């Protein structure tokens, strides 16, 4: 079951939006559905703090035994935090993708990117049609 407080991209990334210090911050990860499709992760590349990301553009990649897949940013802004331990603990993604499995935090500079994202119900319909 996907958390109701998140927004979802067509490419299976999620974002949790919060206010921190007067800025809108998006915490980004990938969904359980995406992890099921990828199976057995072996490597991940995440950006550095300070990297500018654009909605719909790659910010990193994840490698499974099957393939290497780009990770697409659901929002536009600047990376303010990176979950660097995650690369050494890829099993965290499978066990808790929506909390301890977060990847990056982004100071959102363009709210319009949020309008292109899906709510939980719409995202679950997309997954059902793909599954």
Image (tube, helix red, strand yellow):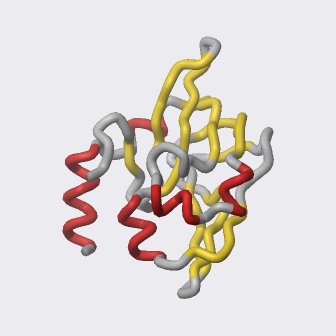
Relative to 101, 128 lies left or right: left
> Residue at left 42%, top 57%?
31
> Residue at left 27%, top 73%?
130
Q: Number of numbered discs present?
A: 0
Picture coordinates of residue 124 (x, y %)? 24, 56
Relative to 99, 42 lies left or right: right
Relative to 2, 75 lies left or right: right
Picture coordinates of residue 22 (x, y %)? 60, 12
> Residue at left 72%, top 53%?
85
Looking at the image, residue 72 lies above or below residue 77: below
Looking at the image, residue 89 lies above or below residue 53: below
Quarter that holds the C terminus: bottom left
Picture coordinates of residue 66 (x, y %)? 54, 87
- Residue 110 occupies which quadrant of the picture? top right
Q: Nearer the viewer, residue 109 or 89?
A: 89
Extreme-bottom residue of the structure:
66
> Residue at left 52%, top 51%?
29
Picture coordinates of residue 104 (x, y %)? 64, 45
Looking at the image, residue 111 lies above or below residue 71: above
């Amino acid at each position: 079951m996907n958390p109701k407080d998140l927004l979802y991209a067509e490419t299976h990334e999620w974002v949790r939006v919060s206010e921190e210090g007067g800025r809108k911050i998006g915490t980004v990860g990938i969904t359980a559905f995406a992890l099921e499709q990828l199976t057995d992760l072996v490597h991940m590349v995440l950006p550095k703090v300070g990297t500018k990301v654009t909605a719909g553009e790659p910010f990193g990649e994840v490698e499974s035994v099957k393939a290497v897949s780009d990770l697409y940013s659901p929002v536009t802004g600047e990376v303010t935090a990176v979950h660097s331990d995650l690369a050494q603990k890829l099993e965290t993604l499978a066990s808790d993708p929506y909390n301890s499995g977060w990847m990056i935090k982004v100071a959102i500079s363009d709210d319009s990117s949020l309008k292109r994202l899906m709510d939980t119900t719409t995202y679950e319909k997309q997954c059902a049609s793909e599954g």
